[in-house]
Amino acid sequence: MQETIVIGEILKPQGIRGEVKVKPLLDDPADICKIKKVFVAGQEHKVLSARAGGGFAYLALSGIADRNAAELLRGKELSALRADAPALGEGRYYIVDVIGCAVVTESGKRLGEIADILPAHTDVYVLKEGEAEAMFPAADGVILDVDVENRRVTVSEKRLAEVMVR
């Protein structure tokens, strides 16, 4: 497993003192506020202050003293050490752990691998096999099991056929 995980995307500066607005990639935006050290473009920053509101997180980072410095972070990924990230409950996993997993049917037929997961109300999985790409929602009955340790996602072949878009 990767040592760091992507926890959000910096959207824009917030105010004139270097604070940034973050689109969280965690279930709860407040979870970002518990992390004390983050990475932006490989550079480590201490979180000086953090707050959540309206589905976003707002962070003041060391080395980012004004709006101009914050503007340079626009559109960049925000990462943290896996050890600093919130613990996940039973049956939960980080997106980074699922990307690259093989997708197989319950009978063992390999369909491809997860190329991406698009966060939404119902996450959308991007399945890639060679050059072919398809998408399917993580709707009820589609995903039967996610085994990140063995890098395998098991799906219902019948249910997948009903919802997959090629």
Image (cartoon, rainbow, N blue to C red):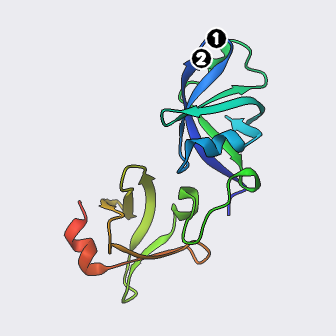
Height in image: 99 above or below 53? Answer: below
Quick check: marks 2 and 1 in contact, CB under 8 Å?
Answer: yes
Q: Is residue 57 left or right of residue 60?
A: left
Q: Quadrant of the C terminus?
A: bottom left
The disc label shown at residue 50, or none: none
> Which of the 4 image quarters holds residue 47?
top right
Residue sitting nearer the eye, 69 or 100? 69
Q: The residue under label 1 is which amino acid type?
A: Asn
Residue sitting nearer the eye, 53 or 152? 53
User: What element does badge 1 sit on?
Assistant: helix
Q: The residue under label 2 is which amino acid type?
A: Glu
Height in image: 19 above or below 158? Answer: above
Residue sitting nearer the eye, 47 or 10? 47
Q: Measuring 22% from the left and 73% from the top, which residue is drawn there?
A: 161
Height in image: 50 above or below 103? Answer: above
Q: Position of residue 9 (x, y in %)?
A: 55, 36
Q: CA–CA distance between discs 2 and 1?
A: 5 Å
Q: On the image, numbered disc 1 is attached to which residue?
A: 68
User: What element does badge 2 sit on?
Assistant: helix
Determine crowd level at label 2: few under 14, some 14-19, many 20+ residues with C-alpha closer than 10 A: some
Q: Measuring 36% from the left and 51% from the top, which residue is drawn there?
A: 121
Residue sitting nearer the eye, 83 or 52? 52
Q: Position of residue 56 (x, y in %)?
A: 52, 34
Q: Position of residue 112 (x, y in %)?
A: 40, 70
Height in image: 93 above or below 37? Answer: below
Q: Measuring 63% from the left and 12% from the top, which residue is drawn there?
A: 67
Q: Measuring 38% from the left and 49% from the top, which residue is drawn there?
A: 120
The disc label shown at residue 71, or none: 2
Q: Quadrant of the N terminus?
A: bottom right
Q: Is residue 16 left or right of residue 91?
A: right
Q: Is residue 154 left or right of residue 91?
A: left
Q: Is residue 62 left or right of residue 148?
A: right
